[in-house]
Image: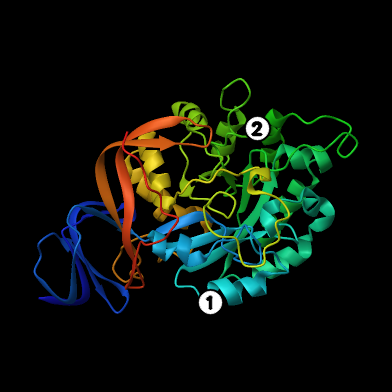
Amino acid sequence: MEAFDTWLVGGHLIDPAQGLDGAYDLGIRGGRIAAVLPRGTPAMARERIDVAGQLVIPGMIDTHAHVFQHVTGRFGLDADLCGVHSGVTTLIDQGGPSCMTLPAFREYVVKPKRTRVFAYLSAYLVGGMEGHYYPSLYKPDCVDVGATVKAALANPDIVKGFKAHAEIGGFARWGLEVMRMSADIARQAAMPLYIHFGQLWPLPKPGEGLDTPVDADCILADVVPLLKAGDILAHPFTRHPGGFVNRSGQVHPIVREALDRGLKIDVGHGSHFSYKMARIALDAGIVPHTLGADMHGYNTTVPAPAGTPDAHSDQDHMFFGQQRFSLASAMTAMLALGLPLDHVVRMVSSNVVEVFGLPRELGSLAVGNPADVSVLNDERGRWSLRDNEGTQLVGERLLRPAFCLKGGQRFDATASILPVVAAA
């Protein structure tokens, strides 16, 4: 009879990487997966955890986090708040650190936190300061291609790619040059480039931008030819101009061309997520590969860091919209839109490892892998789901994080940012 440190019994285990979807018990020994056995298999363990009625899945990986706390001002949240205390074992910070601030990110985020944290390095020297509130800090003069490539190649354990923005506010100011430089960074480093689509900055005032007006519906067509296979198009369901859905309410034809060229799609959920846009894209057959929560200090109800100056209100930020949400609630939204559970689990596990270049031992409950496990309550009923446009969708399945194991250590899902969803 096998002996384990921890024995999770009675749950419904889903591990798409291994093709497992059913009644299995999970054994953990020495911080690693020791066995996946049919439910009811006799075993001995120092700790037996009954997870009957719950989902047991590979430790969830959030593709879109903002956790450079304090350094990025109001923008950066505590990594463990978004991570292990929200049922998530691994985070990818999107554009918080830059080549200048990466050493601080390693010392103050990666090293001390219980959550595993990677970074997609900002293409801009300023990184994610104050939530990208000041567009003048993101012009071509504020990009150093060589320094950014050098920083990434010197820190391969942390840096797995780069973050840049393709949106009308920047294009109206300085055209395509920042995107060209960002694509060059990613090519030189041979890493993916993660591109934000949908408006981020207000349009420039007369005389501050280019002489020729920019059409938001042309941005995708201008950017995709610059990209390589493996680069990631983010925010396909944004409610802001410049996303996958054009002014005519149709998916931009170049999206299919991008997929044919090997580009990937990530749902950075966030406060700009639109059920209307999601429905249009999904009905057109555009199914994203991965899923991130995109929580930050302007769309999540958390106290401002001590000493943060009140330079501008939350409402001034393009992505203001304070709702409690999490990676699990973003999964609930995907289920309500009709995506099958197996695919939604892939979007936060094995697909992330493949698309974002993470270590192969993550994203699966295979024997020998780190014991990163997320346990979710799987509730049935009718739930009222709303986006920040005010659109309501009724979901019949609600996922709530119960706890996770990170390297075999248990963390209960007690984060203050976890949502309270009302019954429909």
Q: Please give the label number shown on residue 284.
A: none
Is label 2 in a helix, a strand or a loop?
loop
Q: Does residue 415 sit above or below 267 in this rendering?
A: below
Residue at x-position 37% and y-position 60%: 87
The image quadrant that residue 150 belongs to is bottom right
Q: Amino acid at mark 1?
A: Lys
Task: Determine contact: label 2, label 1, CB under 8 Å.
Answer: no
Q: Does residue 127 sit above or below 165 in this rendering?
A: below
Residue 221: give x, y in percent of width and height. Answer: 68, 33
Q: Is residue 95 visible?
A: yes
Q: Is residue 22 left or right of residue 414?
A: left
Q: Which residue is mark 2?
A: 241
Q: CA distance from mark 2 to mark 1?
A: 38 Å
Q: Which of marks 1 and 2 precedes in the sequence?
A: 1
Q: Is residue 298 left or right of residue 8?
A: right
Q: Is residue 339 left or right of residue 284?
A: left
Residue at x-position 37% and y-position 47%: 420
Q: Amino acid at mark 2?
A: Pro
Number of numbered discs on residues: 2
Question: Relative to the observer, which residue lies in front, 247 or 191?
Answer: 247
Q: Which residue is mark 1?
A: 111
Q: Does residue 225 sit above or below 65 in this rendering?
A: above
